[in-house]
Structures are given as structure tokens and as C-alpha cells.
Amino acid sequence: MKIVVLTGAGISAESGVPTFRDADGLWEGHRVEEVATPEGYDESPALVQKFYDDRRAALASVEPNPAHLALARLEEALGPDLVLVTQNIDDLHERGGSTEVLHMHGELLSALCRACQSRMPWSGEMSGFPPCPRCGVSELRPDVVWFGEIPYEMDRILSALSEADLFVSIGTSGAVYPAAGFVQQAARSGARTLELNLEPSEGTVWFHEARHGPAGQLVPAWVDEILLRVTP
Ligand code: BV8
């Protein structure tokens, strides 16, 4: 059985990582245009670097939750038949044991050099505009996909959606494209579609089935159901 899972900020909420659109979401106090667009970065690089420095530093104080751990168990059982796509830029899937994670919106722990286009692991601050380890120019930016930029791994994602038997969306509001359109692409290719979210998302109408509640409870239960079906 080929499964594509798409996760959003809701899967990390119970780990203490703020979501974007819930009451105390990340975007509050910051207009999206200020911190998540290339124009916003060019306008105020120090403000944007600090926004991401703070989120990068906060990773040290959060832990994967049972939902992340359950998806790692699923990968162990399904191997390449599971394609895990995340909109999240935290490293909680990896720390929860998942080894193949498609970060379509980039990662906090990666830097992109605007001078030489190199991408490299980065766990420190960037507000001090450090020189790129590869080319020496001080043009490092967070390696995240901002609004108006092209998401990473789209070819692999679209190919996985075209072959999926099941598409499961976990903890996302369905507010941002192209991720929000994946459910329709999967359904067009014949996949069954399931939404696991705290409440109905903006795209809930597109799903064959929806279960509402905390990911920390819904995801382990769903993974146990699947493992019963796929393990002899
Ligand atoms: C692109 C990285 C071209 C940075 C992010 C008009 C119409 C349609 C589209 C557009 C349009 N105008 C512009 C566009 C395109 C635009 C877009 O979609 N805009 C929106 C606002 C309309 N998209 C883009 O620009 C994208 N690029 O389109 O390029 C292209 C297209 C196709 C192919 C090639 C090229 C790039 C967008 C990427 C932006 N970067 N993040 C950073 O993180 O700082 S977006 C960011 O918000 C996330 O990455 C995520 O994608 C998005 C949504 O966040 P969620 O993860 O869903 O979180 P949210 O808070 O919204 O929701 C949380 C959910 O969890 C809630 O439903 C809640 O109920 C639930 N929840 C809470 N707690 C729990 C829970 N669920 C379970 N358990 C819990 N405990």
C-alpha cells in the first residue's frame, strides 16, 4: 500500500511549537509580508533573521510527540511505500525517528547562501550576517521557502501523489498552496484521502474521511490501524 502523508504545524503543536494561525500563532505581531517573503527580507533583513533565529533556538526546548514517533514506526514498516512530506521547518520528524522527510518549505537548520546558492546545515544564529563557509560572502539567509518562492521537492511529491493509494493530511489548515491542493491531486489519481486535524481544515470538503482531535492521539491510533492491515 503506497501512502503519502502531508504534515503541517498542527503535528508539532503538542510539542510546544506555535502554529501559524491559531490564536497565539506565529504570524501575530508579524505581518506575513514582513517575515515570510523575499521582499520582506530585503526590506528588513535583521528583523527576519531574528524571527528565524528565535525559532531555530527554540528547537532545543521542544521534543517530538507521539504523532512524530508513530510516523517513524510507519516508515519502519512501509519503507519507500511511505512518502512523508512536511510543510514544517522544524526537525521533530527526524528527531522522532523518520529518516526520509521531504521538507517542501525548507528547514530552520539549513542555510542558503544568496551569493553562491549553496545550502548547508546551520544550527547557530544568522543575525550577525556570518560569512558563507563556502564562498566567504556574508549573504546567508534561512533556507526556507517564502511566499512567492518555489517549494522544494515538487517533482518527487507530485510523482508520489500520482501513485498513492492513500493520502493523509495531518495538522494543517489547508490555507497555503500548492500543499493545500495535494488532496485533490491524490483523489484525481484514485487515492483515498483522510484528514487528521484538531478541527475541520479549509479543505476538509475534499477528503473522503476526516477525524478531528489532537494529532498526539489520532496519529498513533491511525498508524496502529494501518500496521494491522499491512503487516502479515
Ligand atoms: C508557490 C515556510 C508557485 C516559512 C511557509 C492566491 C490563491 C492561491 C494561491 C496563492 C494566491 N496568491 C499567492 C498564492 C501562492 C501562495 C499561497 O498559497 N498563498 C496563500 C496565503 C493564499 N503560495 C506560495 O507562494 C508558495 N509558492 O505557490 O510557488 C508554485 C506553485 C506550484 C508549484 C511550483 C511553484 C510558497 C508558500 C510557502 C510559504 N512558506 N512556511 C516559515 O515556516 O516561516 S507557509 C506556512 O504556513 C507553513 O509552511 C504552511 O505551509 C502554511 C500553513 O500552515 P499550517 O502548517 O497549516 O499551520 P496553521 O497554523 O495554518 O494550521 C495549523 C492546523 O493544525 C490548524 O488547522 C489547527 O486546527 C491544527 N492543529 C492545531 N493543533 C493541533 C492541530 N491538529 C492536530 N493536533 C493538534 N494538537
Image (cartoon, helix red, strand yellow):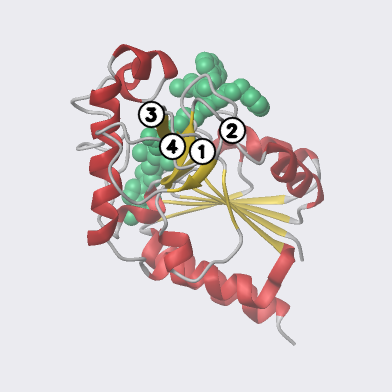
Q: Residue at the spot x=54%, y=23% of the render?
A: 149
Are the residues flagged by discs 3 and 4 in contact, CB closer than 8 Å?
A: yes
Q: Is mark 1 within 8 Å of ligand 1?
A: yes
Q: Is mark 4 within 8 Å of ligand 1?
A: no
The type of residue carrying mark 1 is: His
Residue 119: x %, y % from top left: 53, 41
Q: Nearer the viewer, mark 2 or mark 4?
A: 4
Disc nearer the start of the sequence (2/3): 3
Query: Looking at the figure, which quarter contains the C terminus?
Result: bottom right
Q: Mark 2: give few (<14), some (14-19) or many (20+) Cα within 10 Å.
A: some
| Count of numbered marks | 4
Query: Looking at the figure, which quarter contains the N terminus?
Result: bottom right
Are the residues flagged by discs 1 and 2 in contact, CB closer than 8 Å?
A: yes
Report the residue marked by disc 4.
132
Q: Nearer the viewer, mark 4 or mark 1?
A: 4
Disc nearer the start of the sequence (3/4): 4
Q: Is mark 2 within 8 Å of ligand 1?
A: yes
Disc nearer the start of the sequence (1/3): 1
The type of residue carrying mark 2 is: Pro
Q: Residue at the spot x=29%, y=31% of the render?
A: 49
Q: Quadrant of residue 139?
A: top left
Query: Circle 4 sits in a helix, a strand or a loop, which is it?
Result: loop
Q: Mark 4: give few (<14), some (14-19) or many (20+) Cα within 10 Å.
A: many
Disc nearer the start of the sequence (4/1): 1
How far is mark 2 from mark 4, CA to CA?
Answer: 23 Å
Report the residue marked by disc 3.
138
Are the residues flagged by discs 2 and 4 in contact, CB closer than 8 Å?
A: no
How far is mark 1 from mark 3, CA to CA?
Answer: 23 Å
Q: Mark 3: give few (<14), some (14-19) or many (20+) Cα within 10 Å.
A: some
Report the residue marked by disc 2.
151
